[in-house]
Amino acid sequence: MRPVLVRLHRWFGIGTALFLFMSGLTGSIIAWNEELDALLNPDFYHARSNAPALSSLELANRVEAADPRVRVTYLPLGVAPGRTLQIRVASRINPATHQPYALDFNQLAIDPGTGVVQGRREWGALSVKRLNLLPFIYQLHYTLFLPTTGNGIATGVWLMGVVGIVWLFDSVIALVLAFPSFRTWRKSFTFRVQRGGYPLVFDLHRSGGVWVWGLLAVIATTSISMNLEAPVVRPIVSFFSTLAPDAASNPELRATSNPPAPMLSRERMVALAAATGRDLKLDEPPGAIFEFEGLHLFGVGFFQPGDNVVRSGLGTAWLYWDGRNGQRVGSSIPGEGSAGDIFLQAQFPLHSGRIIGLAGRIMISAMGLIVAMLSATGLVIWIRKLKARRSAAQRATSGRLAKS
């Protein structure tokens, strides 16, 4: 059995090594995405004026009035003192061509006191310019910049989900291989630092993986859950636990008409959300509003305006409405719902480490480097053994030729 597991581990490892090396390094960086982005691009984050902040809803209306090509799709309802209001925008349909207007940006940074646009960028663009560097790394981490197919399949996201499945199976195999004998189990936890060279490389790969195996399994599992939630994970989880409906997957909310059906105003949606939040006894007010692309769907996140929408613990409460009539069509409230709902809520907080706050982010950043190290040392071990096998084969061939 062990030779079969060794072979499986070898080929699973070779097949995923480059993907895991890349995702480990990028994951280590994006654990500090906003902090690093602000450090590189202070003008995109820090407001130039000290004027009192205007209403975010008013600023969004000004943006759309100043450039009729755009519509605001993500709007924080408040900002921290001294910070810019960062909004997301999408193209409107050009009535002359019935096609979306061509835009070279999808994110704006606005001085909330004056309404002046301090910066604009295409978040997730294939560019390593300073303004685009952190979004580029984030996008690379989870899409590899692979295209979306005509029927809406994000090939990069699917590929990384499959890599996660292989990685999880391979992690189980690796744990079995790391303990060939119960009597020598201590060797699987030690590092031959003084010997250095190949013995240390081998120990970094084997013992390093053993020490952090539980965290590796969590990261691999959450990677599968986030990348393959709709096609794989939700059907499996729903077999064991009833799940709340996923509003974004509701076919009745697809915007198929041209021109699209009129949507309720953001002001109306925020007022509706505030009233609903009070009825549900949510602890915090509406903090941001999001309009889904291609859907008659609004989402409102509940957090203190100016706070980060990405929270510690199980994250932010979100409620969802049909944008045509204000009917509530879904919700995701941390800690509420079935066991399956809470399992799904926990996936991003676990993957990012934010479930335990700053300590978790530090741990995940370190784990990204460890994943890259395990991938690199695995390749080194494979190359060394491959050379040894080839040398042995050449010696055997030379011996047979000499005898003949």
Image (spheres, rainbow, N blue to C red):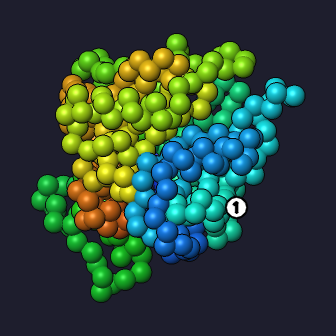
Q: Residues within 10 Å of mark 1 (few under 14, many from 20)?
A: some
Q: Position of residue 276 (x, y in %)?
A: 30, 28
Residue projecting furthest to the bottom: 194
Q: Position of residue 58 (x, y in %)?
A: 54, 47
The residue lying toward the viewer, choosing from 61 and 4, is 61
- Element at label 1: loop
What quarter of the picture does the N terminus occupy? top left
Type of amino acid at the residue the image marks with label 1: Ser
Residue under the point 37% across and 52% down: 305
Residue under the point 23% across and 56% down: 356
Q: Is residue 296 above or below residue 85?
A: above
The residue lying toward the viewer, choosing from 354 and 179, is 354
- On screen, residue 207 versus residue 373, left or right, reads left
Q: What residue is pinned by disc 1?
A: 127
Q: Is residue 271 above or below residue 26?
A: above
Residue under the point 75% across and 51% down: 104
Note whether residue 159 is visible.
no
Note whether residue 242 is visible.
yes
Residue projecting furthest to the top: 252
The residue lying toward the viewer, choosing from 147 and 402, is 147
Residue under the point 56% across and 73% down: 48
The residue lying toward the viewer, choosing from 167 and 8, is 167
Q: Quadrant of residue 371?
A: bottom left
Residue projecting furthest to the left: 183
- On screen, residue 74 versus residue 186, left or right, reads right
- On screen, residue 369 versus residue 396, left or right, reads left
What quarter of the picture does the C terminus occupy? bottom right
Q: Position of residue 268 (x, y in %)?
A: 46, 30
Q: Quadrant of residue 368?
A: bottom left
Q: Position of residue 388 (x, y in %)?
A: 52, 66
Q: Is residue 383 above or below residue 96?
A: below
Q: Is residue 163 above or below residue 14?
A: above
